Amino acid sequence: MLAIAGGKSGVGKTTTALGLAAALDPPVVVADADADMPNLHALAGVDREPTLAAVDDRGVGGVARTGSDEPGVGVLPAPHVGDAGADPDALARALDRVAAADRPALVDCPGGAGPDAAAPLRAADATLLVTTLCAPALRDAVKTAAMARTLGAPVCGVVLTRTRSAPDAVTDLLDCPVAASVPPADPPILDDERVRRAYRRLAMQLGEDLLASQA
């Protein structure tokens, strides 16, 4: 399972999770682990129920919902705040089941460095950072990268959003390659062909390794 992570909210993690999932060969499942700011289901155009918390030993097939805009992508919305399934231990168990599924899986991680952000990173095989080029977002991405490496989810690259550039300084700062630069676009962002093309290129770059990790 690939964690889509960044230390700061609003940098494009959810858009990247869904955009990359849609660009990979189906079927793909993408889970929302951010109970405090759940928006994957809204972006994908699916119901909020059932949530990630409903995933059990039978797997994700009967739980994940497929949106009309992304027919090959199964979406697992975030648990509700206060539900037992939003507890970090319960969330970790659900994510372990998603990671064991017989299809490529991505998880949209919460921002920050608390227990809710740590749970998906522990379950993931690798991490794809997402950040804008603003200084606060880059500083937070450095912290997220350090946490991911500590928790055994090595960073495979970084996606820079709202830009066409890929400065060498970012590679040096985050100690990983720039996997993609996603140009700025007006909402709905994933309807912009330039954006979708950027995620298709990213999928081609990461797809083989991502599929291998699910074997």
Image: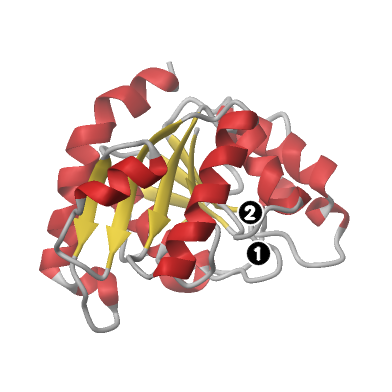
Say which residue label 2 marks. 33
Give the CA distance from mark 1 to mark 2.
Answer: 14 Å
Which image quadrant for residue 209?
Answer: top left
What percent of the width, then of the height, locates residue 101?
A: 54, 28
Helix or strand or loop: what does disc 2 sit on? Answer: loop
Circle 1: is it few (<14), some (14-19), or many (20+) Cα within 10 Å? some
Task: Report the front residue among 7 and 202.
Answer: 7
Which tag, 1 or 2, sits closer to the chain's start? 2
1 and 2 marks in contact (CB < 8 Å): no
Q: Secondary structure at mark 1?
A: loop
Find residue 40 and report its horizontal and vertical position in percent: 50, 65
Query: In the image, residue 14 lies at what x, y percent?
Result: 45, 62
- Residue 49 is labelled as 1
Q: Amino acid at mark 2?
A: Ala
The amino acid sitting under disc 1 is Glu
Q: Work out which quarter of the rendered image holds the C terminus and state it.
A: top left
Q: Residue at x 25, y 45 (%)?
A: 178
